[in-house]
Amino acid sequence: MTSGRFILEKELLSSGVMKIEIFGAGMAGCYLACLLERSEHNYKIYEKYKNSKCPSPCAFGWANYSKVKKLCNLIDVDSDSYVLMRPKEAIVNGIDFKIRDVVIFDKPRFINDMRKSLDVVYEVPNNYSGDLIVDATGHSRALLRGVDIKYLVTKQYRVKVTTLDSDCIYIYAKPYGYAWAFPLSKDEWHIGAGGFTQEQVNFLIGQLNKTYEIKFNDIECACKSPIIWDYTVSYFKQIYGINIVGIGEAGGFVSAFGEGNTLALETAKCLHEAIEYGADDIDLIIDIYSDLVWKETSWVITQYDFVETLNESWFKALFKVRDVIKVANMRNLDASVWKGLKLMWRLRK
């Protein structure tokens, strides 16, 4: 990521002649395509799978939801129609935090509905013919490979649980990762964990179930999916004159606490703005995108720095609690530094 340098002072210059190819019809790719469709740009979007891998109504979270609503309005989509639950608090290692502006939404249906509004090509070409190639392939980074990237291992379930409060999100955290349980309905829950090793993930889920006395028998759905945990990866590269730019998780835009769905929309919007203002000048588009995406995502550095420091030295991480609480409050949490310090005490290895 680079620091912000470019200020949008110029009039709309894009001629729409430039050809754009999007690889990946997930959340980020589809949202970018919807924006390009409305601004009448020349684009194609490719996808390997005809349906989202996750079966509806499996769901995930949108943080900073007030902004998500505005982003969805740009493509004439009512985001409220995809909202399943609106939790009011998060209990982390037994400590209660009030949360705001967070919803649980039906991610597979949201993606599949966007696909229906687009002319998605389900046969991925072996070569590129666009002037600007967009990697929206998520953690696989199919077009931006070649970098040694850190990944988190995850394990996730959809289960029935009747003993939890559906107004809450339950979390058990350690310095290396955390396990979660969030409601899909009154008695249907998404339970999972992310860590650097499978052993850590299994331990976290076990401790989550033990701490909150979660019991379930039948697993309705189970999956494993790695998550990029590295904000230093490059979101742009040029190969033999081919310009490739990443959005969403493919660009490395995932927070240290796993937040990526809102970032997928935000970064796609940044690229669309850059295309609108950059005319057909690829270098200018990338320069504008770099500045816009830095402005939107620079807060993730505070999170990554905190978690990395916490894994190196619990004591040194104490001095970063204020900064990470400030970021959390900015997006979705009502928390004091005091509660942050109490949680730190419980996070000791």
Image: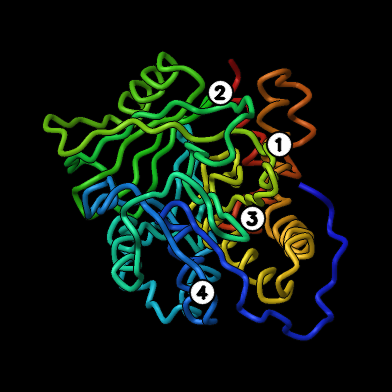
Q: Where is mark 4, residue-wise?
A: 35
CA–CA distance in space, label 4 to label 1: 27 Å
Q: Quadrant of residue 106?
A: bottom left
* Amino acid identity at mark 1: Thr
Q: Which mark is residue 232?
A: 1
The earlier-in-sequence mark between 1 and 3 is 1
Which of the two discs, 3 and 4, sits closer to the camera? 4
Residue 83, position as x, y percentages in the image: 33, 65
Q: Where is mark 2, residue-wise?
A: 176
Residue 279, position as x, y percentages in the image: 72, 75
Q: Does residue 202 sit above or below 143 in this rendering?
A: above
* Amino acid identity at mark 2: Tyr
Which of the two discs, 1 and 2, sits closer to the camera? 1
Q: Does residue 277 sit above or below 165 in this rendering?
A: below
Which of the two discs, 1 and 3, sits closer to the camera? 1
CA–CA distance in space, label 2 to label 3: 22 Å
Indicate left or right for 74 with 273 as reference.
Answer: left
The earlier-in-sequence mark between 3 and 4 is 4
Q: Where is mark 3, residue-wise?
A: 329
The earlier-in-sequence mark between 4 and 2 is 4
Q: Residue at x 72, y 76 (%)?
A: 277
Q: Quadrant of residue 305?
A: top right
Q: Residue at x 47, y 52 (%)?
A: 23
Q: Does residue 17 sit above or below 241 in this rendering?
A: below
